[in-house]
Amino acid sequence: MAVISVTELSTTLAGGKSLAGLDLGEKTIGVAVSDRGLSFAHPRPVIIRRKFSADAAALLDLLAKENVGAVAMGLPINMDGSEGPRAQASRAFVRNIARMTDLPFVFWDERLSTVAAERTLIEMDFSRKKRAGKIDSAAAAFILQGVLDRLHALGEGSAPA
């Protein structure tokens, strides 16, 4: 199904499906999954990146287990609005994994999501070592929560459970 807009999510998520959020890092893939009511983002353990086929298999397995109906991919846009190599890598990841699944993907501007996640983990008194293992999933939760909040603002966030 490839890439859709946020406004198209309401029809895609009918039937109690959840929404996933991804933060694609160089070494890990941060994952968060919504509740079925599409209100809250819940971080999941990161996927350690190895090679694309293994990463995709692990991710698709997790998404199937979580009853995910669509995926919000964080798009790391530069502060000036341009797209650099990290944004291109995120787009390429979606292009490649979209060939392996019928799940639709939505890109979400993730500017400052990692910064916000880091601040939250610091406020929760996580050590630097513990933050390193949780930062990508926390950033994925920030990305996903942004999409969920947008859905609710559009009046489309109450898909039947």
Image (cartoon, rainbow, N blue to C red):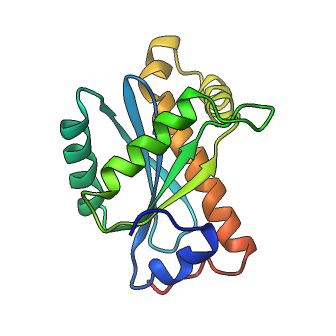
Q: Is residue 79 left or right of residue 150?
A: right
Q: Quadrant of the N terminus?
A: bottom left
Left or right: residue 119 compared with residue 104: right
Horizontal side of 81 relative to 27 (left or right) equals right
Q: Is residue 65 above or below residue 45?
A: below
Question: From the image, which quarter does the C terminus lie in?
Answer: bottom left
On the image, the x and y values in percent for residue 100 come to 24, 57
The image quadrant of residue 124 is top right
| In the depicted structure, whether residue 28 falls above or below residue 159 | above
For the point 61% across and 31% down, the residue is 114
Where's residue 52, x and y in %? 25, 36
Q: Residue at x 30, y 61 (%)?
A: 66
Relative image position of residue 26 (x, y in whole percent): 42, 24
Q: Estimate the x, y position of residue 29 in percent, counting from the top left.
A: 39, 35
* Residue plotted at (70% across, 34% down): 112
Task: State the residue lying farthest toward the top.
Answer: 128
Residue at (59% x, 48% y) in the render: 143
Task: Say how many tags the image has.
Answer: 0
Position of residue 4 relative to residue 122, above or below, is below
In which quarter of the view is residue 118 placed? Answer: top right
